[in-house]
Image (spheres, rainbow, N blue to C red):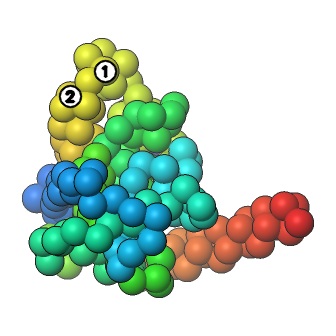
Amino acid sequence: GYKQTEVGVIPEEWGAVPLKEKVDIAHGFAFASEHFASHGPYRLATPGHFYEAGGFRDIGEKQKYYVGPVPSDYVLQPGDVIVAMTERADGLLGSAAVIPEEEGYLHNQRLGRVTVLSSEIQLDYLVYVFNSPSYHTKVGETAAGSPQNQRELTSLARTQSRNYDGFASSRLFLQTKPVRRLAVLSSERATTSGAGDT
């Protein structure tokens, strides 16, 4: 059966739990613009790498590279989850994306890196929570009453992502099944989109 919760209708065996103390979102680093380049060992991850509805976007020739010194804590690894902390386009604030297999992306400012602090939460599942309509509605409602400057939006994205009552089960396999199904659907959508572009 199903039940009504603060995040909508969910399966009876699931629970709605706040993500506070279950995840951490770390701020990015302000890399010096004088070290930006058209080619180099590192790629700068930016809000432009996000689709508004979530997911990682290859920005092609617009990609900026970095040739300066890099703090090791700000080198992203394939599979890391990042969230947008700016509202450059409607719906972008709080959107999540997964760093692709290519190595060398940097954790730039205006992005947050998500770390799971609880064994109850599966990182891949959080991507779909952060990209869900209910989460974006909550972030949008809060942002509507906030001054639209960078500091306010960055704080908002981090606070809302950590305090949001996400839907999750205490049993990980109940998170794994929808993650696998949604991954298949995302892959099919990407394939269809790519075919339409040719």
Residue density around tag 2, few if under 14, some if 14–19, many if 20 or more, within 10 Å: some
Q: Is 180 situated left or right of 38 in this image?
A: right
- Seen from the viewer's position, the closer of residues 48 and 127 is 48
Q: Residue at x 46, y 41 (%)?
A: 92
Q: Which residue is mark 2?
A: 152
- Seen from the viewer's position, the closer of residues 11 and 186 is 186
Q: Is residue 79 above or below residue 18?
A: below
Q: Is residue 170 above or below residue 64?
A: below
Q: Secondary structure at mark 2?
A: helix
Residue density around tag 1, few if under 14, some if 14–19, many if 20 or more, within 10 Å: few
Q: Secondary structure at mark 1?
A: loop
Residue 72, given in percent of the width and then of the height, sits at 14, 77
Which label number is shown at residue 148?
1
Q: Are marks 2 and 1 in contact (CB under 8 Å)?
A: yes
- Name the quadrant of the C terminus: bottom right
Q: Is residue 171 above or below residue 148?
A: below
- Cα–Cα gap, marks 2 and 1: 7 Å
Whether residue 52 appears in this view of the structure is yes
Kind of residue sitting beneath label 2: Glu
